[in-house]
Image: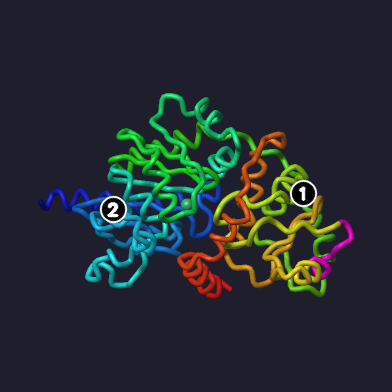
Amino acid sequence: MAARIDHDAAELEALRVLSASVGADPLLVQGAGGNTSLKEAGLLWIKASGTWLMNAATTDIMVPVELAPLLDAVARKSPAAEKADQFTPADLNPHRLRPSIETTVHALLPQKIVVHVHCVETIAIAVQANAEALLEERLRGLDWAFVPYRRPGLPLAQGIAERLQPRTNVLVLGNHGLVVAADTVAAASLLLRRVTGLLARPPRAAPPPDVDALIRLAMGSGYRLPVAVEAHAAATDLASCRIAASGSLYPDHVIFLGAGSVIAGPNENADAVVARTTAAGQPAPASILFPGKGILMRRDANAGAEAMARCLPDVAARIDPAARVNYLSLEQNAELLNWDAEKYRQELNRSSAATLQ
Ligand SMILES: [Zn+2]
């Protein structure tokens, strides 16, 4: 028994190290996105909601969930499966962390280790109308399944349950991301590297931003330059800008930046864009794309919004301009924005952003 516990402790430690390295790569995980888990003795240890994988090696971000009652709640389509906090043994959760809103994804896979990432290489394929055909070409020989887009939580869990085969260890989630599963951390890490390598394609090169013009466009407004210089490519690469202008590609974009992207007109500065959007009953946008010039962020944009502003060009630059893209529908955007569990995650991010400033 002692040997088994030692082994599990070593695996949990290995998972924390893998989580931190995956979380530090913006091409795999952005902000509080992505999550990892380990199953042992009837418990699922999963990343807590709102925490960042990047901090996994230095902070206690894993929370235990009782696997059997959670799977039972999924089978009964009970809303309790979405938050999963009622299945968390209080004595093992001293910081009262809440399990990830994506806990059900991990619970449904039988393997001991599950890694879920918002890999930009995967998303760039998973938003395309012919995603399954593209995946078939690249993932031939692997036990993969494609799960068409559903809202994270119970709907996604049901979508996964419909597609899962006994040997499936790679899931590509439509308009969302990638899941890999294995019985050891080392095998999960190898599989993640293998799949992301097979799905990788070089991004289109983007012209540099026109920072002087952006500073003029921001003057006197509540907007500023983004933290990551890479974020400008969403506007300086006009093909990416067109993709962004057409709608929302994946859930975390909607949650942190709002539905779709706001594009400035040729003669609009930041103030003019805000006047236009507020006149239409919309809030001041978290980010504004100035085609050919770059992007501006609302002054109070948090670290999650910054991460998603950079993710947009990282995904869009890997989508062929001629590709047929599936955007989230109005209803799909709305269900993300009205989702209580997400509001909780946003609050956590707001408070973590405050401490960063
Ligand atoms: Zn996800």
- Which residue sits at x=74%, y=61%? 288
**106 sits left or right of 266 in the view:** left
The disc labelled 2 sits on which kind of residue?
Leu
Where residue 210 appears, as percent x and y from the top left, is: 81, 55
Dot 1 falls on a residue whose secondary structure is: helix
Going from the N terminus, do you reach mark 2 or mark 1 first?
A: 2
Whether residue 221 appears in this view of the structure is yes
Q: Amino acid at mark 1?
A: Thr
Give the residue at the far front of this rendering.
Answer: 76
Q: Which residues are magenta?
A: 266-273
Q: Which residue is mark 1?
A: 236
**Where 33 falls versus 281 (above or below)?**
above
Q: Is residue 269 magenta?
A: yes
Q: Nearer the viewer, residue 207 or 138?
A: 138
Number of labels in the image equals 2
Please state if 17 lies on the left or on the right of 67 as rendered. Answer: right
Q: Position of residue 189 (x, y in %)?
A: 38, 41
Mark 2 CB near ligand 1 (8 Å cut): no
Q: Secondary structure at mark 2?
A: helix
Residue occupied by mark 2: 71
Relative image position of residue 47 (x, y in whole percent): 37, 58
Nearest to the observer: residue 167 or residue 61: 167
